[in-house]
């Protein structure tokens, strides 16, 4: 998507409510300033919001799809991220307006009706899953199980809700206190598929573990969503130079800023969509240099001459791109 296409789709929404729902996690209620219904969405959808920092970020909708007058998103302040969540949680307040792209669903797109739905969430990964659960309850389809993990109770958004009536026999809430010995054993749950569908969203470690345990499941029955893992900064990140082959333009990519944002900051219009390394829109041909691939799209073969510029960085002093 080009910047012009992005702007054409953007709508301005009012921050009607901002509320802390866990440690460093805030719930935002977004409404039309004129009270109109908002574009519809399906369970598992996300919106793309642009906080004051100017860094567009995807946030899963966590309310029920039948609520047409509002969007609910929960944002965790990620101090190791690229600044979007910090801007959102510290600079956006009740009464402000924020630019938002309408909902898109790349997670909850199963067209089958499973006998059982298994939800596995870690940390802020509960947000799209909460929307799915509320939808199932609205449809009176209560055959689901939720396994929700955080390090401590204080980090668990919507904890009181999931401890409330109607969830007692359907929800497992677990805190490992950062101790590997206390990690919940999911193998008895995932050993046999039994016609179930699985939806998982959370940190990379949890996602990788669930992938390993569901390798024998059919591909169409396992669904993952990851906005954070690919975009998280690393302590070893260093600045590097990006060279555009067609114009011989050269720009420094600082720590904490993506190649994509660097190019935009210098006036280049580059196609993008998810900006989390999951969709493939910003795929760019790599001419020279050693990349640090952080996407969830490219195959090992494709990584030899392509790069996702929204999340990936460089191991070498420079990268040359076919731009």
Image (spheres, rainbow, N blue to C red):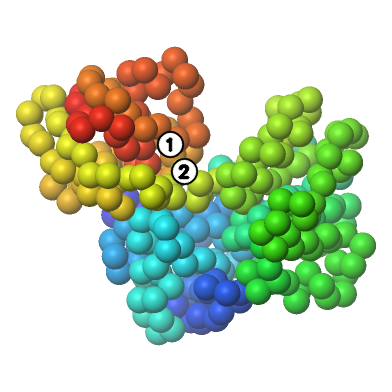
Q: Position of residue 315 (x, y in %)?
A: 31, 32
Residue count near mark 2 (Cα–Cα under 10 Å), binned few <14, some 14–19, many ≥20:
many
SS class of the residue under badge 1?
Answer: loop
Which class describes the residues within 10 Å of circle 1: few (<14), some (14-19), or many (20+)?
many
Seen at 76% across and 32% down, the residue is 214
Is residue 11 shown to the viewer in this render?
no
Please indicate whether residue 222 sits to the left or right of residue 35 in the image. right
Q: In the current view of this chain or complex, which residue is farthest to the top?
A: 301
Q: Name the residue under label 2.
A: 230
Seen at 56% across and 79% down, the residue is 20
Mark 2: secondary structure: loop
Residue 235 appears anywhere in the view = yes
The image shows residue 105 at horizontal and vertical percentages of 56, 47
Relative depth, front residue between 279 and 141? 279
- Residue 196 lies left or right of residue 127; in this view the side is right
Contact between labelled residues 1 and 2, with CB atoms less than 8 Å apart: yes
Residue appearing at x 14%, y 30% in the figure: 244
Q: Which of the two discs, 2 and 1, labels the residue nearer the N terminus?
A: 2
Residue 290: quadrant of the picture? top left
Residue occupying the point 84% across, 53% down: 145
Compare residues 43 and 146 and report the one nearer the observer. 146
- Whole-percent x, y for residue 218 in the image: 76, 26
Question: What's the mark number on residue 294?
Answer: 1
Name the image quarter holding the C terminus.
top left
Q: Distance between the residues labelled 2 and 1?
A: 5 Å
Q: In this view, does 128 lie above or below 320?
A: below
Q: Looking at the image, how many numbered discs can be counted on the residues?
A: 2
Task: Please give the label number shown on residue 234.
Answer: none
């Amino acid at each position: 998507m080009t910047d012009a296409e992005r702007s054409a789709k953007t709508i301005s929404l009012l921050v009607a409510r901002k509320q802390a729902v866990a440690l460093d996690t805030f719930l935002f209620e977004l409404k039309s300033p004129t009270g109109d219904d908002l574009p519809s969405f399906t369970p598992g959808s996300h919106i793309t919001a642009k906080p004051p920092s100017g860094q567009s970020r995807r946030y899963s909708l966590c309310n029920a799809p039948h609520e047409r007058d509002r969007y609910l998103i929960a944002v965790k302040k990620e101090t190791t991220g690229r600044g979007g969540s910090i801007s959102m949680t510290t600079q956006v307040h009740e009464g402000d307006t924020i630019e938002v792209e309408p909902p898109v669903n790349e997670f909850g797109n199963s067209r089958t009706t499973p006998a059982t739905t298994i939800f596995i969430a870690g940390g802020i990964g509960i947000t799209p899953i909460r929307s799915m659960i509320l939808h199932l309850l609205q449809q009176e389809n209560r055959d689901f199980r939720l396994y929700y993990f955080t390090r401590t109770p204080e980090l668990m958004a919507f904890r009181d809700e999931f401890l409330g009536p109607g969830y007692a026999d359907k929800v497992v809430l677990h805190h490992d206190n950062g101790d590997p010995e206390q990690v919940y054993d999911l193998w008895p749950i995932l050993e046999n598929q039994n016609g179930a569908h699985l939806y998982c969203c959370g940190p990379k470690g949890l996602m990788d573990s669930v992938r390993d345990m569901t390798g024998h499941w059919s591909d169409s029955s396992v669904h993952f969503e990851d906005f954070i893992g690919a975009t998280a900064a690393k302590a070893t990140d260093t600045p590097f130079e990006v060279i555009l082959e067609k114009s011989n333009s050269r720009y420094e990519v600082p720590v904490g800023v993506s190649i994509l944002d660097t190019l935009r900051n210098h006036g280049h219009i580059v196609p993008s969509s998810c900006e989390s390394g999951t969709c493939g829109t910003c795929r760019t041909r790599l001419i020279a240099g050693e990349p640090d691939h952080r996407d969830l799209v490219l195959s090992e073969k494709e990584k030899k001459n392509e790069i996702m510029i929204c999340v990936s960085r460089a191991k070498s002093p420079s990268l040359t791109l076919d731009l």
